């Protein structure tokens, strides 16, 4: 038996595929099915045409999913970048509190530092420590003002 000689009628194709006669004619016009005579098509061409048609349909459905995966990857990358930037930036209140804690610790250490020495050096060190504490507090005030206003501190920031 030679499959190339076998034919299927349009009604047989309609029954097998669950499609309409118009769809069968449309598939023949597009070249999926080889028409042998009016209303009859080559069995080999019908099987090959159906296979090709459904493969193309599957590939057409995969393309949007590929695009969707690309879009999702881009969205994830943007989310990651935003998260990284948010980790780099801390709220102003936290920054001010952190600077205050550092200055308090430095002040406590400098205040006790002169006690390790004896007079007359002790009074000189105490005076220098108090002056240092004042400079540190002045720098803290400038930094706090800069954070609140957004102005630069002596060309920095």
Image (tube, grey):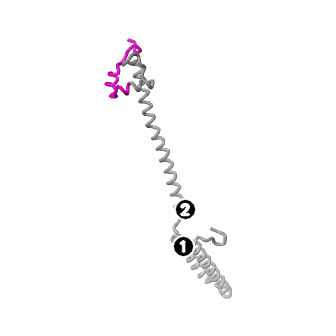
Note whether 110 is above or below 39 in the view shown. Answer: below
Say whether residue 121 is left or right of residue 68: right
Note whether 11 is above or below 82 in the view shown. Answer: above
> In which quadrant of the rendered view does residue 25 lie?
top left
Check the image and name the residue furthest to the top: 1
Residue depicted at x 57% and y 72%: 149
Q: Position of residue 79 (x, y in %)?
A: 49, 54
Is residue 64 found inside the magenta-colored segment of the image?
no
Note whether 83 is above or below 135 in the view shown. Answer: above
Q: Which residue is mark 2?
A: 88
Q: Quadrant of the N terminus?
A: top left
First-in-chain label (1 vs 2)? 2
Residue depicted at x 41% and y 15%: 4
Residue depicted at x 53% and y 70%: 92
Say whether residue 85 is left or right of residue 53: right
Q: Position of residue 35 (x, y in %)?
A: 41, 19
Graded by Cα atoms within 10 Å as few (under 14), some (14 to 19) or many (20 or more), the crowding at tag 2 reads few
Q: Which residue is mark 1?
A: 96
Is residue 10 found inside the magenta-colored segment of the image?
yes
Query: Given contact means CB atoms under 8 Å apart, are the residues at marks 1 and 2 in contact?
Result: no
What separation in Å lies between label 1 and label 2 (alpha carbons)? 16 Å
Q: Position of residue 30 (x, y in %)?
A: 45, 26
Check the image and name the residue furthest to the left: 15
> In which quadrant of the rendered view does residue 138 lie?
bottom right
Note whether 110 is above or below 98 in the view shown. Answer: below
The magenta segment? 1-24
Q: Secondary structure at mark 2?
A: helix
Q: In the rendering, which numbered label is found on residue 75?
A: none
Graded by Cα atoms within 10 Å as few (under 14), some (14 to 19) or many (20 or more), the crowding at tag 1 reads some
Q: Secondary structure at mark 1?
A: helix
């Amino acid at each position: 038996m030679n499959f190339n000689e076998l034919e299927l009628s349009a009604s047989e194709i309609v029954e097998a595929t669950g499609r309409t006669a118009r769809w069968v004619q449309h598939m023949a016009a597009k070249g999926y099915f080889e028409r042998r005579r009016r209303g009859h098509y080559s069995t080999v061409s019908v099987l090959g045409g159906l296979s090709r048609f459904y493969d193309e349909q599957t590939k057409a459905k995969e393309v949007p999913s590929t695009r969707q995966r690309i879009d999702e990857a881009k969205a994830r990358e943007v989310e990651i970048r935003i998260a990284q930037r948010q980790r780099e930036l801390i709220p102003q209140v936290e920054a001010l509190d952190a600077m205050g804690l550092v200055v308090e610790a430095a002040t406590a250490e400098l205040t006790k530092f002169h006690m390790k020495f004896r007079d007359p050096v002790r009074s000189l060190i105490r005076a220098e420590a108090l002056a240092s504490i004042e400079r540190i507090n002045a720098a803290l005030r400038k930094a706090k003002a800069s954070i609140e206003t957004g102005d630069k501190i002596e060309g920095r920031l």
